[in-house]
Image (spheres, grey):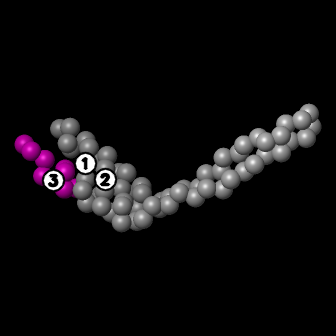
Amino acid sequence: MQRKKVGIVSIVIGLLMFIYGGFNYNPSEKKVNASSFNVNNEKFNNLQWPPIAGVLLVVGGIAVVLFERK
């Protein structure tokens, strides 16, 4: 039963990875804070992964679910 749960979770994560392909995040860091004068440093970061990684997770999850020991 435990392997079946792991297989289903990997299928779901693989599908999400394949559909979205990555995400952007923008951390903001305060550099100067003097009364009404503020200076912020924003970085624009992009995290991408190859679509084949999602496909491999889906295929692996399906294999785990189908070939579970009974």
Residue interval drawn in magenta: 62-70
Which label belongs to residue 11?
2
Left or right: 57 in relation to 29: left
Which residue is more in the foreground, 29 or 12?
29
Q: Is the residue 18 above or below the residue 10 in the image?
A: below
C-alpha span from label 3 to label 1: 9 Å
Residue 53 location (% of width, % of height): 36, 61
Residue 10 located left or right of residue 44 = left
**Which of 21/30 is in front?**
30
Task: Confirm or deny contact between disc 3 and disc 1 (CB under 8 A).
Answer: no
Check if mark 2's residue and mark 3's residue have beta carbons within 8 Å.
no
Label 1 belongs to which residue?
7
Which residue is under mark 3? 66
How crowded pointer 1 is (Cα within 10 Å; few <14, some 14-19, many 20+) is rated as many
Residue 24: x percent and y percent?
A: 59, 55
Q: Can you tell which quarter of the image residue 17 is in?
A: bottom left
- Could you tell which of marks 3 and 1 lies nearer the N-terminus? 1
